[in-house]
Image (tube, coloured by chain):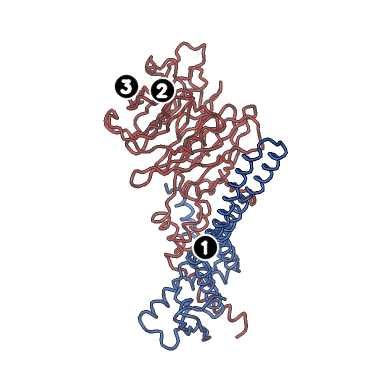
Amino acid sequence: MTMTEEQKLRKTEEAGDIRGDVLESILCLVPLIHLLPATQVSKSWNHAVFSSLHHFNKPKPWLLVHAQSSRPPYATTALAYDPRSNLWLRINQNPPIEYVSALRSSNSTLLYMLSLSKFSFSFDPLHLSWHHVDPPLVWRTDPIVVVVGGHVVVAGGACDFEDDPLSVEIYNLDTRSWTTCESMPAILKDSAASTWLSVAANAKKLYAMDQVTGVTYSFDPSSRIWSEPFHLRHDQNIYFSAIGYYGDSLIMVGLLGNSENVKDVKIWELKGESFEFCKEMGVMPKELVVKLKGEQTNLFSIRVSLMGEFLYIYNPGEPEELVVCEIDGEGLCRWRSLKNAAVSDGSRVAKRMVLTCADVGLGDLGKAVGSGKGSFSIVDSGNLQRF
Amino acid sequence: MSSSNNSGKVLKLKSKDNQIFEVEESVAIQSELIKNVVEAGCDIGVIPLLTVHSKTLRNVIEWCQKHVDYVEENDSGSNEEEIKNWESEICEEGNNNGSDDEETKNWESEENNNGSDEEEAKNWESEGNNDGSNKEEVENWEWEENNDGSDEEELENWESKFVDVDKDSLYALLLAADYLSIDSLLERVIKQVADVIKQCRSVEEVRQTFGIKSDFTPEEEEEIREEISWID
């Protein structure tokens, strides 16, 4: 037999012969973004991709970091971290999004920009779809903006000269119209802005917690009623706390001690009608608290982006190191640190960082790439690979 | 070359293209398949490996040999004993200086009047105190001998070079590792194949790389593209 005939013999008998199990093990190691082409290779590959994702290495919530220059034209870099493959990607929007003002977020899933003429917001997983609507009646700088069901609730953050700092307006996504409703509880008058409030929302209600006092109110956009206050802190040593949704429960992340001397960072799960049942889930390892503090000795505040079983915690004053907490099947916390790829050592240009979190699946990536709205490049020191 | 294994038994493996390979049992049983054959007592004569070509089998045997060698070279038991003996020798030497220190002190107290004598005492003391460097030596030696870290690295580099082959050969290795059930090889090849997929930039490239023919009709392909778009 000649060499080429031998090769052919090997090829024809072996091509496409990878056992399903083996193929699935291989696909476990392939990042989500690379699995897209794999689904279209053949029927067995298509099946193996979905089976592998379902059984062996499920997609995990991504962290999205938007780093925006503080000066016009507000150049913005959008990066995403995929914890399933420990990979950072750059998201390129097509056409590029016009950032006309400061990008903000008051909870884990929504990004917004507010200017005199426009209110823009996005809550799709990769922030490739933006809604542009008329701004609310009350002029605001940093309100809390949350999607609850089919409503976008905009509360507080009013400019100084406005009469009511506690004003609440709701934008109905179906009717595309604004309504003003009951203002926020008076006790929040000095903290009614996204700087001071931490917000959690599900399909029916939003919860707003004053990060310093811990006092929490809920709001139902259908009934447009603000609730009586909840007192969610069961530990008197908490000086700062933030909340988020975890299934049907609330998760609270708290800083204990005081800002000059933070003793601990802890996570609690709160359950029950008024969240009266409190269970400590985990304590951040000391070496990670040190990383969170960065070059400062103080820890004044933290921001938490949370989705599914993942919490991304960062210190707005020192955004270089993030702390990631993954809650495993048994409810145990697994901690690690993550270098923020949006912070590069070279550039000392003032940047604002806005972090959100999303469940990104193969479908979302497919939609983005297929529609041409988004393309991705892997952030890597060497190869820049585009999709 | 490694020392031969105790039983010294040699197995005969036959490749798909009828080539016979003589392999030490300790090396061959890295394959679960062959191990089972041996344990079932069926290893009389020749073991036929119906799907593995001689070229691939040769490489697989090389892998198995390397891994058997690695385990033998890194048998830490004997190394630890040697270190202990060496350490106790050093300590003995070190203890001799103890008596010298005593002498120094005696000398100092005797000659306290003379400034120049005191200076001399100090110089003498500092000479005696050079045990410090002996201790350092012990530490360095330990680090070198116990540093499986660098051996592991060396194996990793060897493995990476081993799987850095053309696509056809890699594919053949994958199938052989699976058929023969060699965990270490399968794991490493799986990683390599995943890396190969990561390098592909399109569906066609994946197909070409792995020699796969699409079994979708054009309509089905369109459907998939759409299905992916709408799956949550």
Q: In front of the other: label 2 or label 1?
A: 1
Label 3's element?
Answer: loop
Residue furthest to the right in view is B116
Q: Nearer the viewer, residue A21 or A253?
A: A253
Look at the image and give the colour of chain B: blue
Q: Is residue A231 left or right of residue A9?
A: left
Q: What percent of the width, then of the height, locates residue A242? A: 42, 29
Residues at marks 2 and 3, CA–CA distance in whole angstroms: 14 Å
Q: Residue at x 32, y 23 (%)?
A: A230
In the image, which is nearer the foreground, mark 1 or mark 3? 1
Which one is earlier in the sequence, the residue at label 2 or at label 3? Answer: 2
**Which residue is found at the position 42% from the left and 65% from the top?**
A20
Q: Position of residue A266 (x, y in %)?
A: 40, 34
* Residue annotated with mark 2: A210
- As drawn, is A76 to the left or to the right of B30? right
Specify the quadrant that holds the N terminus of chain A.
bottom right
Question: Which residue is painted at 46% across and 56% down in the image?
Answer: B224
Considering the numbered disc 1 on the image, is that residue within a helix, a strand or a loop? helix
Residue B111 appears in the picture as rendered: yes
Where is residue B80 drawn, in percent x and y?
50, 62
The kind of residue tagged 1 is: Asn
Q: Which mark identifies residue B85?
A: 1
**Chain whose colour in the figure is red:** A
Task: Please give the chain letter of the residue carrying mark 2.
Answer: A
A246 and B37: which one is in front?
B37
For label 1, the crowd category at 10 Å Cα-Cα, with few meaning under 14, some 14 to 19 and many 20 or more, is few
Residue wearing tag 3 = A227
* Amino acid type at image mark 2: Asp
Query: Residue A118: x and y, percent?
Result: 54, 25
Chain bearing mark 1: B
